[in-house]
Amino acid sequence: MKPKASDRRSFLKATAIAVSAPMILPSGILSAATKPNDRINVGFIGLGKQSGGLLNNFMRDNSVRVVAVAEVDRNRRDDAKQKIDRKYDNTECADYNDFRELVQRDDIDAVCIATPDHWHAYQTIASLDSGKDVYCEKPLTHNIHESIAVMNAVERNGRILQTGSMQRSSRIFRVACELVRNGAIGKITRGAVNFGPPGVPCDLPEEPMEPGLDWDMWLGPGPLRAYNSILSPRGVHKHFPSWRNYKEYGGGMVCDWGAHHLDIIQWGLGTDESGPIAAVPPAETEAMNGAQLIYEGGITVAHGQGIGAHFFGTDGDVQVSRGEFAISRKGKKLAGNLNHPDGRKARDSELDKAESMFLKDKKIHLYESSNHIVDFINCMRSRKKPNTHEGIGARSAICCHLMNQSYYHRQSLLWDPIRLKFKKGSGHPSWMTRDYRGSWVVA
């Protein structure tokens, strides 16, 4: 007999009471004999390039069962169902064109959302309101209003949310931020981030559309426009589509890579519960980099410099990107594999060196995770906040949105990171949200 969702959720609550720390669930620990009422059932919404790795990671854990998928492209939907059915050696994975059919199922405990940015908040809130925990790709939201709405939805539903800012589950970023937070380079004076430009208005021409794509559903909350394959390439493609370049659907590289590196700035500055107090556009009117976020104490974070996330202090600097980091003091590199003759092979030994030099007696210990999805699953069971929970994901997204708004309007914006609103005389309430199409309104 198929167990009721309430039975599984009772199990999750009982497990949360029974443990005092997150349960580690590495691959292979729980066998295929896991009892059905102990299992976490997951549904996937959005099955493009990004979902491939996410799907493999969820299916690697034998305490998890992917039971349903939702995708507006028939080819991608069929491909995902076939992969899942092969994994479990059955034909039981349900597939939907409309994600709402998946979300309404009582036997699903969590959803993984990997749709374009303009869908994130609506689908996340719908899932939370249906009693599900949520793993949602970064940036968590398309605009500031949605960040606030998602945080409120998590609170009123008492659910677990993990944002896909997976750099926080990487040792190299954690060690870099612990160096900064524990004073290894003195008092922080400024920062820098390096990623591409802000979003631009979509001006793509109409193309003929092949059958098998629900284009109206792909657009969802976004404005109605003619189909173009740059926004939604047909079938199972192996690249990241360029919808993210257009502000109707994404936020350019400011909301793509910026959601990663500005998140690390937030972590390193210790501002996860607050954020910047201003966003300033570049001096050159047409420039697509050079905007700055300003934090309390006059700390500026400039867009378009460094290798990823770069922290400058009174005694030195720390640089970090994927696979590379360095710490220098008084102009001398003390540890790091940036420009190291052995490159990435030296990463772990250089991290060990930096920890030995500066972090043996550290006072600030940052959240330690080596696998972002395992962290989410652990927190579903313990009911503890994961390492990029809704407050972190929403506020890191707000950093991206503030920077973009300074580009879009070429104005300096004063921001209240506690009350989450523009300060009097700055910005405009309409810049915090968007015009939603039809019934797809994020309230």
Image (spheres, rainbow, N blue to C red):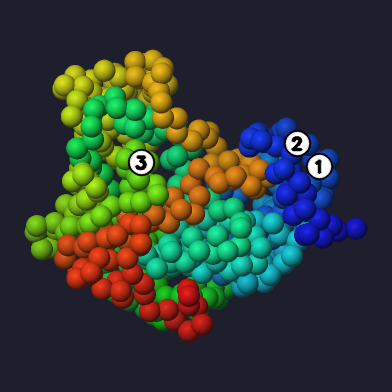
Of residues 134 and 53, the one drawn nearer to the viewer in this rendering: 134
Q: Residues within 10 Å of mark 2 (few under 14, many from 20)?
A: few
Asked whether residue 138 is in view, the answer is no
Residue 408, position in %: x, y?
22, 67
Residue 250, placed above or below residue 366: below
Residue at the spot x=21%, y=63% of the render? Answer: 413
Residue named by callout 3? 270
Residue at the spot x=76%, y=46% of the render? Answer: 14
Residue 425, position in %: x, y?
19, 71
Cβ atoms at labels 3 and 1 below 8 Å apart: no
Residue named by callout 1? 34
Looking at the image, which residue sits at the far right?
A: 1
* Label drawn at residue 30: 2
Of residues 423 and 379, the one drawn nearer to the viewer in this rendering: 423
Q: Earlier in the sequence, mark 3 or mark 1?
A: 1
Q: Nearer the viewer, mark 3 or mark 1?
A: 3
Q: Quadrant of residue 27?
A: top right
Q: Residues within 10 Å of mark 1 (few under 14, many from 20)?
A: few
* Label drawn at residue 223: none
